[in-house]
Amino acid sequence: MDAVRLTDDQMRTFIRDGYITVRPNLPREYHDEMFAKVDEVFQTEGNPGNNILPRIPELQLLYDDPVTRGALAGIMGDDYYLEPHRFVHFNQPHSKGQTLHKDSFTRRRHHTRWLVTFYYPQDTPLEMGPTGVVPGTQYTNVIPEDSYDREIGAAGDAGRIVIANYDIVHRGMPNHTDRKRYMVKFLFNRMGEPTAPSWDNKDAEWGDEGGEYSGLLSHAWDWFRADTNGGHSANGASVEDLITALSGDSEHAAFDATYTLSDIGEPAVGPLIDAMRSGSADNWYNDKDRLRRIPGQMEQAANASYALAAMGGHAVPALVDSMTTSEEWDKALAAETLGDIGLEGRDAVQPLTEASRDIHPAVRGQAVEALGQVAQGTSDAVPALIDALSDEDETVRRNSALAIAKLGPTAVEAVESLSALLNDPNRYVLGNAAEALKRIGTPESTEILIDHLMTARWCPVTRQGSLY
């Protein structure tokens, strides 16, 4: 059955709030069965973690459903990737709940390339502790002080899936009941850069120009639509005043300035590069894991990066220059920004290739990830990515394998190197390598992948007490 595509209103809700809720066309009996199976696994084996899907393969029906597929494709493009990280969150009776936070595998970009989904196999009223989300916080680095007042519990009956921006502020809420609450979490990655709307798009314009964060949200709408002509008037604003606001204490004012500067274009590039190289990139990279919880942190380097990424091709030459002359964290942020520009950053392939051999692993990791986004449709980046597959740093290997997966059939020469990663000690390097072999899709890559999977296959019915 064809995927059921999101409407413009649903897409606006996701862009503005950071999440939507969908309901697959599966009967109540299915969800009751999933609850029973998850509960049995927990009682007899403990949390299966990343193995939840092979342990209960019927969960895949949720994501094969036309409603779920259409929603994921509308946000992430038709060729999205189900990430190897999965988890079952058990909210035990009378729990105190979690603290509001952002998840630790930090992305913190305004272009949505990562999603998380929350599936509830049982009725979950508010008192039972569903996931709480704070709408609109997917874009902020500072977690608002009033987040607990703004929090919305994803309560409802069995069978719903909450699709959320990976960066949204959230938590498991307190479970005040005597009942168990399970939630199954999956992650998804955008593989192809936007080239056209992938939902049932009718409207060209965002349509809420006066709302909160209107410049950011309007840009996000245009980015999802692959509309590079969506800039808005800067209304004669002073670049100097906007840079001051971008560097101030109010993240709301900083984001308004950020997207006004992106609309100004070339005259703002130099001041934005200076702001990005102010020294605060070091703080942003090194503190964003530590400050996942209230209050968070805002840095002018990050805001300048968002403006330059939104500006697109106009910013590429200056970012390339910054990347080749800056210190470690400034260089890493320049590479990350080039990657966030996507296809308009194609002229940066060679400089990013050079950065993939940098002495600093943070720079190498950002450079290879960026190559997977700016070099799509070509094989130009493949030799550098093959070299990065043997990097001593596991983040570099993981990012390189994912970048090759994004390049797909153009990366045929990477097959032999990818096959060596199927024994990598890092589970996510291995998972991304398998995905890359699948997407390259040659007879050789497919045979290597199938041979590996036949050895590594998990038997879902083998367990203690039923070993044969």
Image: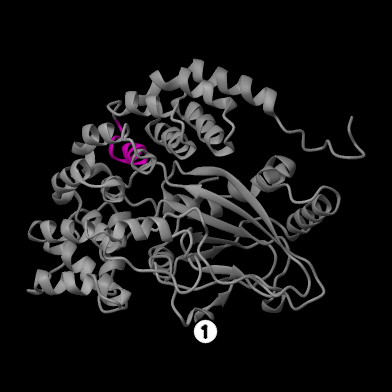
Q: Position of residue 185 (x, y in %)?
A: 62, 55
Which quarter of the image is occupied by the C terminus? top right
Q: Quadrant of residue 383?
A: top left
Q: Is residue 274 above or below residue 318?
A: below
Q: Is residue 357 above or below residue 337?
A: above
Which quarter of the image is occupied by the N terminus? top right
Q: How has the structure been colored for display?
A: one colour
Residue drawn at point x = 19 percent, y = 56 percent: 311
Q: Is residue 243 above or below residue 421?
A: below
Q: Which residue is mark 1?
A: 149
Residue type (three-letter) at the residue carrying disc 1: Asp
Indicate yes or no whether the magenta region holds residue 370. Answer: yes
Indicate yes or no whether the magenta region holds residue 52. Answer: no
Q: Residue furthest top?
A: 444
Residue drawn at point x = 18 percent, y = 62 percent: 262
Q: Position of residue 268 (x, y in %)?
A: 11, 61
Q: 377 and 86: which one is in front?
A: 86
Q: 117 and 292: which one is in front?
A: 292
Residue 41 visible from this viewpoint: yes
Query: In what element is the residue under mark 1?
Result: helix
Q: Quadrant of residue 254?
A: bottom left
Q: Position of residue 418 (x, y in %)?
A: 48, 24
Span of residues in magenta: 367-377
Q: Position of residue 153 (x, y in %)?
A: 59, 75
**What's the magenta bit mostly, secondary-structure-wise?**
helix
Q: How many marks?
A: 1
Q: 461 and 360: which one is in front?
A: 360
